[in-house]
Amino acid sequence: MRTFRDITGREWQLRITVWDVQRVREELKIDLMDMNTGETPLVSRLHVDMILLIGVIWVCVEDQAKKFEVTPEQFGRSLGGTEVQGATKAFWDELRDFFRQQGREEVAVVIEKGQELAEAVVKEATSRVAAVDPVEELRKRLPPVGN
């Protein structure tokens, strides 16, 4: 089981079970048991689409939310940047362990490699953007003065 905190400091416990996987399948029409097939595998979609990922996390913590009397909107509003990062880490670590405990090491490795790839993409994109000289880019795109 993993935990994360929202903006209010409320602690959420995230433990992924077969019931959660079934509810995610029914409510969001995505299959956590099939992480690596399709043109855009679910593991990639969840790394790129924060809203989809938070939706999955919501389904997994919805029973707690009822106890806290937290609506889906309130849950979303309680997750700022730092909190999303904590929830994201908790989700991926918990999902990886869910598969590993089933003896599905191949899926656990897909999840780990997906995390590594997402981190590498961010690092490379950051490096490329940091290397851009705005004045030079402007000069390339504007016609010379006086023509």
Image (spheres, rainbow, N blue to C red):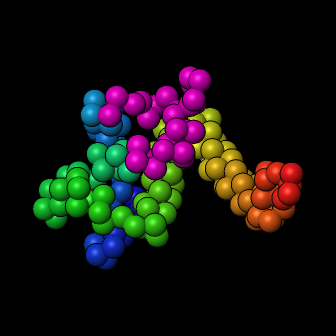
Q: Is residue 133 above or below residue 17?
A: below
Q: Is residue 93 left or right of residue 53?
A: right
The image shows residue 58 at horizontal and vertical percentages of: 30, 50
Q: Is residue 46 magenta?
A: yes
Q: Which one is nearer the viewer's eye here, 107 or 30?
A: 30
Q: Position of residue 126 (x, y in %)?
A: 71, 60
Which residue is more in the foreground, 64 or 143?
143
Q: In the rendered image, which quarter is residue 75 located in?
A: bottom left
State left or right for residue 5 relative to residue 36.
left
Q: Is residue 105 visible from the viewing direction of this image?
A: no
Q: Residue at x 63, y 44 (%)?
A: 114
Residue in the picture at 28% in, 53% down: 61
Image quarter for residue 108?
Answer: top right
As drawn, 22 above or below 37: below
Which quarter of the figure is the N terminus placed in? bottom left
Answer with left or right where residue 7 lies relative to residue 140.
left
Q: Which residue sits at x=76%, y=64%?
A: 134
Identify which residue is drawn at 28% across, 30% down. Answer: 26
- In this view, the residue farthest toward the top is 38
Residue 133 forms part of the magenta stretch: no
Residue 67, position in %: x, y?
Answer: 14, 61
Residue 69's spot in the image, x, y percent?
A: 13, 62
Q: Which residues are magenta?
A: 28-53
**Does the image show residue 79?**
yes
